[in-house]
Structures are given as structure tokens and as C-alpha cells.
Image (cartoon, grey):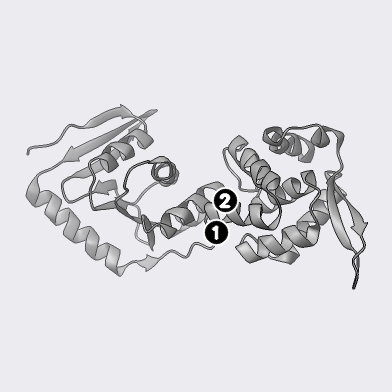
Amino acid sequence: METKSNLLNQSVNEILRTVIDEAPEVLHVVNPSRDVIEQLIDAATAYEGDLPEIRMLANESILKDVMEDFIIASNAADLIDADALRMRTTEEPAGNELLITDDVVMALVTAGDSVGGLTSDDGEFVDAANDAYTTNWEEADEFSLRTPPLSRVRDTLREEISADAEDDFNSVLSSLETARGDGDGLDEVTISLLVAAKNEALLYDISKWGEDVGIASKATFSRTKTKLEDMGLIGTEKVPIDVGRPRLRLKLAHDELESADADQLAGVAQSILH
């Protein structure tokens, strides 16, 4: 069997970029692990050229778990908005992790800390794989991603709150490897409230923004605000308005947070929470 060069001792990200560089029209990503899903989103988000139509066919429970991370999910939503990514799910037992284009079939094999892309470009084999996985794709269920695109989150935060708030939000996200809110990073609501408090925005404004853009409901913002207030991270002061109850202005309430730069905000908050 004639094969293209195997890709050995590379990162998953490097292997994915190599495949995308070949400019396929469609890239099937079959049975990806958690790490492959994350690396694929990272690679596609950072890619500066034209992306293929990436069709990800993944185990539903694995995909749901990965998409609990706001950073990964919001970048995936941007790719979906750009028609570069589609995600469908299967309940079938996980098989080989495969990358399939019109020209090549590549199996991803992990050996310790090393990853290999074992490659075949045998015409009959590639055609058969494409036919089989195109059928699987067409029969699979669409994955519903409820996280808003990160670009929309940023743009609306700038419009609805302030340019400084957007800059701080970007700095906080850049300082985090993950944003899950399960003890492994802060969740997106907590991040938004800390940024709002740093910029002394109104709770009404940040929670309305969060609900409108699709991050979480006003009730979730209110509950999280109460938790952060009870733990001494943020405080509020009443701001009178012409009609109705006073609004609450958010403020940082901890000395370490008040003196922290935006890119230190998450780390300081996590140390206080723990």
C-alpha cells in the first residue's frame, strides 16, 4: 500500500495543522478524544488561512463535557458561525480516532507522551472510508451548542458595558487555561461579574447583557453575585434612579483584587475562593 509520510512525535495540534494545510474541502474528525477536540478547536481558531468544512463526529458525553469549558465552547461557536465547523454525536463505542479527507485517512495513535498520525492515501481505502463515514455523519444527531460565539460576547460587552470591560475580560480569559467553574478555572458568569466589579458597572447592566448574549440568565447572575459578595470578593452600593428601586453598582471588595491587574484577577480570585 502506498502511503503518505506518517507524522510521528508531533503534537495533536501540529498534526491537525498539517492536515488543514493540505486544503481539503471537507475534514472528517471521527471519534475524537477530549484532547483532540480541544486541540482541534485551538488549531482551527488560530489558523490564518481558509479552513475546510470540519465535520466532527464525537461521543456525546465526551463532547458535552469538553463544551462545559467556556473558552473552548465559545471558540467552537465562532467556528460554527463561520461555517467552518459542524458537530454531530454518536452513541457508538469509541473506535479509532481518525482524520479523513478526500485524499488521505489518518489514524491518531498515542504512545506515552508521543502522538503519531499513521497515514494512508490508497485510493480504494480512502474512498471506502469516506463513503462509510459520510453515511455515519448523515445519520448522526446534530450537537446543540448553547454557548454564544466569543466574538459576539466581546463585541456586545464593549457596546453594552465599556471598552475597558472588554479589554479586562480578554485579559482574564487569556490568563486562564480553562473556564469551567468546577474548581478548574472560573466560570463565565464569575468572570463577567469580576470584570464588571473592576469597572464598577451596574449589576442590572451586566446581568441583562449576560442574558441577552446567551451566557446565563439574570437569575444566575444574581445568585453568583450573592455568592461572591458572601465570600468577600465583590460588594455593591445603591445607585438611585428616577423611577423604581435603586440599582446596585458592583465594586471589588478585597484588597488583593483591587490592586490586581486584569491578567492577575482570575488567579487572585481563585486563591481567595479556595
User: Which of the 4 image quarters holds residue 153?
Assistant: bottom right
258 is higher (above) or lower (below) than 30: above
Task: Indicate the position of residue 103 as horizontal and vertical percent values.
Answer: 15, 47
Q: Residues within 10 Å of mark 1 (few under 14, many from 20)?
A: many
Task: Indicate the position of residue 240 as horizontal and vertical percent values.
Answer: 92, 63
User: In the drawing, does residue 8 fall left or right of residue 240?
Assistant: left
Tag shown at residue 147? 1
User: In the drawing, does residue 155 fall left or right of residue 13?
Assistant: right
User: Which of the 4 image quarters holds residue 184?
Assistant: top right
Tag shown at residue 32? none
Please name the residue shown 92% across and 58% down the image.
238
Q: Residues within 10 Å of mark 2 (few under 14, many from 20)?
A: many
User: In the drawing, does residue 232 fall left or right of residue 64?
Assistant: right
User: Which of the 4 image quarters holds residue 135?
Assistant: bottom left
Question: What is the CA distance from the residue labelled 2 to the residue labelled 1?
Answer: 7 Å
Q: Are marks 2 and 1 in contact (CB under 8 Å)?
A: yes
- As helix, strand or loop, the secondary structure at mark 2 comes to helix
Please name the residue shown 50% across and 57% down the image.
64
Q: Which residue is mark 2?
A: 70
Looking at the image, which residue sits at the far bottom? 243
Task: Indicate the position of residue 146 as horizontal and vertical percent values.
Answer: 53, 63
Which numbered disc, 2 or 1, marks the residue that appears first in the sequence?
A: 2
Indicate the quadrant containing the C terminus: top left, top right, bottom left or bottom right: top right
- As helix, strand or loop, the secondary structure at mark 1 comes to loop
Indicate the quadrant containing the N terminus: top left, top right, bottom left or bottom right: top left
Q: Is residue 267 visible?
A: yes
Q: Amino acid at mark 1?
A: Thr
Please name the residue shown 55% across and 47% down the image.
71
Q: Amino acid at mark 2?
A: Phe
